[in-house]
Amino acid sequence: MKISARSKKMIQPAIVKYNGLIREIEKTGKKVYFLNLGQPDIATPPAFMEAVRQIDDDVLMYVDPKGIIPLRQSIVGYFKNYDLDYDIDEILVTMGGSEAIWYTFLTLCDEGDEIICPDPVYSIYREVAKATGVKLVPVETYAEEGFELPAKEVIEKCITDKTRAFILNTPGNPTGRVYTKREMDDISQLALQYDLFIISDEVYRDFIYDGEEFLSFAAREDVAEKVILVESASKRFSACGARVGFLATKNKEVYEGLLKMAQTRLSISYVDQVGAVELFKLEQDYLRAQLDEYENRRDTICEELRKIDGVVLETPKGAFHLLVKLPIDDAEDFIQFMLNDFTLDGETVLVTPGADFYFNEELSKNMVRISYVLKQEDLKRAAFLLRKGLEAYKSK
Ligand SMILES: Cc1ncc(COP(=O)(O)O)c(C=O)c1O
């Protein structure tokens, strides 16, 4: 018996990679601070569960594969806060942003087609690309330059007759980069010139710091027919377990293609959608309070990390992840050490190796991604453990 070559090529994403080991370690009573996952510790707004408790249907039925109408209406309303104008028939509700990424790759590309992405990139794109036979073509960006996209001419060199799209994530996971007008103009011009799609993953739209303005590809008229938005309730409403995301596009042909993919799974959870209706209706005050909280967390983690000798980082402008250079040669080995060998008063900290996000192995060797999803006192403690861990690792 034989299983597919594509599944053999895939690797475990960071989110599950250490699960087995963590369970073993936690059995010993050791406490682990998780800075490796984008799983916020903030309570999900009670409106979600209140709406779910109101459900009194006798039968939980399949619902519209596009997503229930009240949810799509609620999303349209949320978009209006950002001056984004979508109709309910331009929204397709998915099982998290993750499913949205699958459908987009499957709809835009045949096997062997190419999508251009920045390096480093959100790791799930790489695994979905392997599974769907799409080739991701990386454009190198550098920590020292705040992960800015290179000049248009450099990106243009990556375009071949197989290129179908760009995939960008702003604000970015793992970099925290928020793309500027210059970068978005360049991508839009190339998309128009070479007739390419722009997959814009904006699941962190609501996390932009320092009062910076957020620019969405979806707000641009020049590429209106080319943009496919990947969206999610997970981060903005601290509702990762609700598994509600969505796609938005003004391109009817693309929408029909995405819908055919979605019809193969018939429907997504009705219960989760009922809860999510209330999330997307939340007042802007809720999102503003979250933003303040994350901005404080960002400042705290950056300040604490800068106290560690040899650590190099740029203050991220958005999302809740940052890539940090550690004064070590092998981030994976250091992480194993932190889990298996290091403990201070029964505690340790877990971060994600940069290699999970990089195509260029050389650039990733001493990099780790830190997700500042914990409250400030936990972040301080975790940074302290990281410092002590580095000292212990170096004197090993
Ligand atoms: C950039 C980015 N896109 C999409 C997702 C998918 O999230 P979900 O499937 O929980 O909606 C994530 C999750 O971490 C992410 O970081």
Image (cartoon, helix red, strand yellow):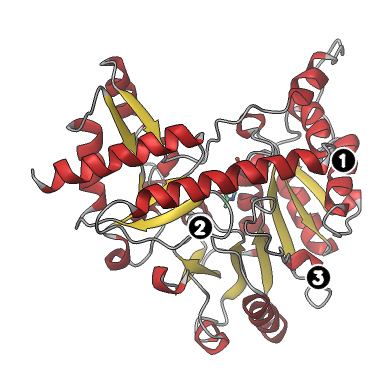
Please report whichever mark, 1 or 3, sits nearer to the chain's N-terminal start: 1
Q: Secondary structure at mark 3?
A: loop
Q: Position of residue 129 (x, y in %)?
A: 51, 57
Write down the quadrant of residue 281 in the picture: top right
Mark 3 vs mark 2, foreground winner is 3
Residue denoted by label 3: 225
Write down the quadrant of residue 18 in the picture: top left
Q: Position of residue 137 (x, y in %)?
A: 48, 71
Q: Secondary structure at mark 2?
A: helix
Does mark 3's beta carbon lie closer than 8 Å to ligand 1? no
Residue denoted by label 2: 129
- Is residue 116 left or right of 309 when viewed as pictured? right
Quarter holding the N terminus? Answer: top left
Q: Amino acid at mark 1?
A: Ser
Residue denoted by label 1: 74
277 and 310: which one is in front?
310
Does mark 2's beta carbon lie closer than 8 Å to ligand 1? no
CA neighbours of label 1 inside 10 A, class few (<14), some (14 to 19), many (20+): some
The residue that appears at 86% across and 60% down in the rendered structure is: 83
Would residue 55 be seen by someone viewing this image from the given angle? yes
